[in-house]
């Protein structure tokens, strides 16, 4: 696949000072690729009567598992494209949101652009006045000296801890930043250079066992494959 970034579209409609509507559009070529992956995944997960597993026709899967494929397609597009793009765009335009965006409508069909529509609550704009109009005054600089000292001591401490840090592999309790690509059965990126950057904490509970198995013992820069 050609190595390129994925072009999504972001449209915002301001309905009132405290409310807006946002539409994120995913181009049809990405929808088609995602649809093919959803069909393949569905084919692997079913065993209809009268077919050997490797002989199930693709057309049979498409016709008989429409809702399953559609749900999987929406999940791929939403989790791997729409959600992070939405928040990045809101941050770019400095949209002052109140709470999380609410997904209100999804339009997804193979061969067409996909649209994800959101309702977003906004904080009203606050007009800040000059200091002289407030009943309180800006503190004098000399009162910041203790904060300056604390900040300097904190930076010294962290620099020293960094020098003493010798751990080379990921351990339980670490926070890990990693890039995630969707790959095919040949371990090739399905969407070229498109990736998601995520953070995860390696916990020590039973529910964290899958994350532990995936990350524990890995070194920075390690490339590995997982399945879901």
Image: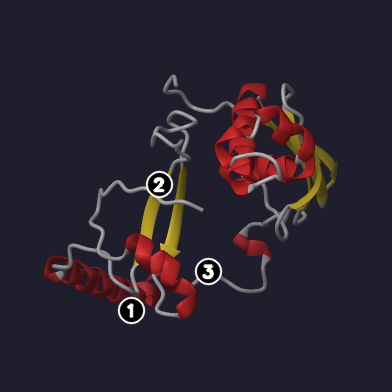
| Disc 2 crowd, CA 10 A, few/some/many (<14, 14-19, 20+) | few
Tag 3 residue: 138
Kindly check if marks 3 and 1 are in contact, taking CB atoms under 8 A apart as contact.
Answer: no
- Image coordinates of residue 187 in percent, x first then y, are 38, 37
- Image coordinates of residue 207 in percent, x first then y, are 50, 75
Tag 2 residue: 179
Q: Secondary structure at mark 1?
A: helix
Q: Which is closer to the viewer, label 3 or label 1?
A: 1
Q: Which is closer to the viewer, label 2 or label 3?
A: 2
Q: Quadrant of residue 212?
A: bottom left
Q: Residue furthest top?
A: 2
| Disc 3 crowd, CA 10 A, few/some/many (<14, 14-19, 20+) | few
**Mark 3 and mark 1: Cα distance apart in space:** 17 Å
**Residue at the image position 34 percent from the left and 61 percent from the top:** 215
| Closest to the observer, 67 or 85 | 67
Left/right placement of residue 150 relative to residue 211 reads left
Could you tell which of marks 3 and 1 lies nearer the N-terminus? 3
Kindly check if marks 2 and 3 are in contact, taking CB atoms under 8 A apart as contact.
Answer: no
Q: Quadrant of residue 204?
A: bottom left
- Image coordinates of residue 202 in percent, x first then y, are 39, 70
Tag 1 residue: 146
- Image coordinates of residue 13 in percent, x first then y, are 81, 36
């Amino acid at each position: 696949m050609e190595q390129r970034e994925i072009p999504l579209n972001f449209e915002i409609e301001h309905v009132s000072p405290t409310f807006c509507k946002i539409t994120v559009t995913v181009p049809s070529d990405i929808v088609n690729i995602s649809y093919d992956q959803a069909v393949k995944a569905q084919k692997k997960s079913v065993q209809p009567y009268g077919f050997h597993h490797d002989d199930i026709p693709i057309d049979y899967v498409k016709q008989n598992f429409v809702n399953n494929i559609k749900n999987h397609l929406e999940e791929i597009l939403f989790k791997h494209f729409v959600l992070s793009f939405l928040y990045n765009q809101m941050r770019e335009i400095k949209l002052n949101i109140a709470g999380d965006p609410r997904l209100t409508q999804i339009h997804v069909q193979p061969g067409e652009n996909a649209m994800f529509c959101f309702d977003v609550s906004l904080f009203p704009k606050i007009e800040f006045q000059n200091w002289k109009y407030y009943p309180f005054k800006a503190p004098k600089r000399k009162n910041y000296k203790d904060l300056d000292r604390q900040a300097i001591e904190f930076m010294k401490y962290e620099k020293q801890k960094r020098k003493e840090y010798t751990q080379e592999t990921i351990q339980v309790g670490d926070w890990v930043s990693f890039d995630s690509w969707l790959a095919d059965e040949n371990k090739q990126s399905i969407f070229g250079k498109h990736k998601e950057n995520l953070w995860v904490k390696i916990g020590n509970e039973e529910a964290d066992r899958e994350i532990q198995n995936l990350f524990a013992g890995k070194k920075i820069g390690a490339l590995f494959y997982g399945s879901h």
